[in-house]
Image: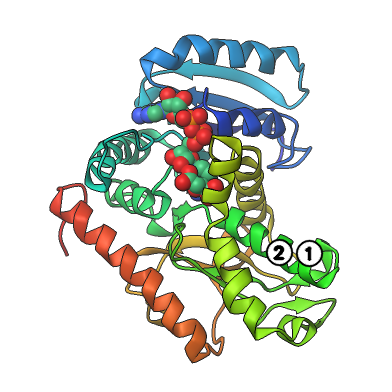
Amino acid sequence: MGTTPVTVTVTGASGQIAYGLLFRIAGGAMLGRDAPIRLRLLEIPAAVASLEGVAMELEDGAYPLLSSIDITDDPKVAFEGANIALLVGARPRTKGMERSDLLAANGAIFTDHGSAINAVSDDDVKVLVVGNPANTNALIAMNNAPDVPRSRFTALTRLDHNRAIAQLAKKTGAAAADIERVAIWGNHSNTQYPDLFHATVAGRPALEVVDDPDWLEHDFIPTVQERGTAIIKARGASSAASAANGAINHVRDWVRGTDGSNWVSMAVCSDGSYSVPEGLISSFPVTCTDGEYTIVPGLDIAEFSQQRISASVAELEHERAAVEELGFVKPR
Ligand code: NAD
Ligand code: LMR
C-alpha cells in the first residue's frame, strides 16, 4: 500500500464494536504493518464527548501507523477521502419498536451515509456495513451512491463464517486452521444458511469426517443461525469483539487477498449467481485477489441447501420490498 496513509472511516465509533475494532486497526491488523492510517470517526452529537475519550486512548497507544484521528458528527466530513468505510453505527431496536420502525430509522441513516460516500469518498472506496439489518442497510447505502460501483458495497457475514468454522472444529477436534471452504449464504439473520457441503477438514470432506446428518441439521445449522441471539442472552449485549474480528478479517482479505484454495463469506451485490436476484446484498462464498472479490462459480448446490438458501433470499427480498415502500430504495 506504500506510505500514503489509507483513510479509514468508522461510524458508530464510540460504540462497543468500534471499541473492539479501532485499536486493532491502528495496530495494523486490518491493512498490514506497512500501511499508515488516517482514522475518521463519526458519531451522533450526543456521543461525541465519549468518542473524544476513545480518541485519547488511541493517541495513548502511540501507534506507529496511526498518522491522524479526526472526530466528527457530520457524515460529509467523516467520509471525506475515505478508502475504507466501516459502517458500524446503526439504530438498535429498542422496547416497543416494530421491525418497520427499525427499518425506517436505519433507512434514514444509511441513505444519508450512502449519499455522503457518493459525494466525498475516494474513487477506490470499499464499504463494509456491520450495523443491522446489515444486508439491507448496505442495499440502502448502495442505492444512494449511484456514482460508486455496486461491487464496493458489502455487508458482514464473516462473523457467521467464523462461527461455522468454530462449531465444525469443535465437533471434529480439528484446528480452525485445518478447515476450509465453509460458506454462509443469504441474510445476516437467523435465516442464514451455513453450508458444509463443500467444506474440508484437513483436506477431507467435512460431512464425511462428521458422518452425522442429525448434527448438521439439528445442531450445527441452528447453532450458527442463533449464535448472535445466544450471545445477547448470555452477555446482555450483542457480540462486539467477535464482530470486530469478523470485520477486520473481511476487509483484510478483500484488500490483501484470500489464501490459496480457500474461500471466505461476504454479503455482496448479487449478479444473479445461484439464482439470487440481481441487486440484492446476499452472502456468498468468495475469493479475493488484487482488491476485488469473485463469487465462487459453479458449485453444485444440493436440494437440502437450495431450500435453505431460497428461504433466506426470500427474507432479503421482503426487506428490499419494505425499504422500497418506505422510499429509501427506488422501486425497480
Ligand atoms: P452500540 O450501540 O454499542 O454502538 C453503536 C454506535 O452507533 C452508538 O455509539 C451510536 O451512538 C452510534 N450511531 C447511531 N447512529 C449513528 C449515526 N447515524 N451515525 C454515526 N453513529 C451512529 O452497538 P454495537 O454493539 O457497536 O453494534 C453496532 C451495530 O452492529 C448494531 O446494529 C448491531 O446489531 C450490529 N452487529 C452486527 C453484526 C454482524 O455480524 N453484521 C454483529 C454484531 C452486531
Ligand atoms: C450477531 O450476529 O452477533 C448480531 O448481529 C446479533 C444482533 O442482533 O445484534
- Report whether 321 appears left or right of 162: left
Residue visible at 66% across and 50% down?
Answer: 249
Vertical arrangement, residue 210 with respect to residue 98, above or below: below
- Specify few, some or many for label 2: CA neighbours under 10 Å numbering under 14, 14-19, or 20 or more: some
Residue drawn at (44%, 67%) of the image: 186
As helix, strand or loop, the secondary structure at mark 2 comes to helix
Measured from the top left, where is residue 252 in percent x and y? 67, 49
Above/below status of 201 relative to 321:
below
Q: Is residue 206 above or below residue 325?
A: below
Please give left or right for residue 111 compared with residue 164 in the image.
Answer: left
Q: Position of residue 217 (x, y in %)?
A: 58, 78
Q: Left or right: where does residue 284 sit relative to residue 234? A: left
Mark 1 CB lies closer than 8 A to ligand 2:
no
**Front in this rendered view, residue 286 or 185:** 185
Q: Quadrant of the N terminus?
A: top right
Instruction: Tell me the SS state at disc 1.
Output: helix
Kind of residue indicated by mark 2: Gln
Q: Residues within 10 Å of mark 1 (few under 14, many from 20)?
A: few
| Vertical position of residue 279 compared to residue 80: above or below | below
Q: Residue 291 falls in which quadrant of the image?
A: bottom right
Looking at the image, how many numbered discs can be counted on the residues?
A: 2
Residue 130 makes an appearance in the image: no
Residue pictured at 39% horizontal, 55% vertical? 149
CA–CA distance between discs 2 and 1?
5 Å
Q: Position of residue 172 (x, y in %)?
A: 81, 72
The quadrant in which residue 322 appears is bottom left
Residue 7 rendering spot, x and y as whole percentages: 56, 32
Asked where in the image residue 16 lies, by quadrant, the reply is: top right
The answer to whether mark 2 and mark 1 are in CB contact below 8 A is: yes
| Residue identifier under label 2 | 167
Name the residue that disc number 1 marks. Answer: 170
Which quadrant does the C terminus fall into? bottom left
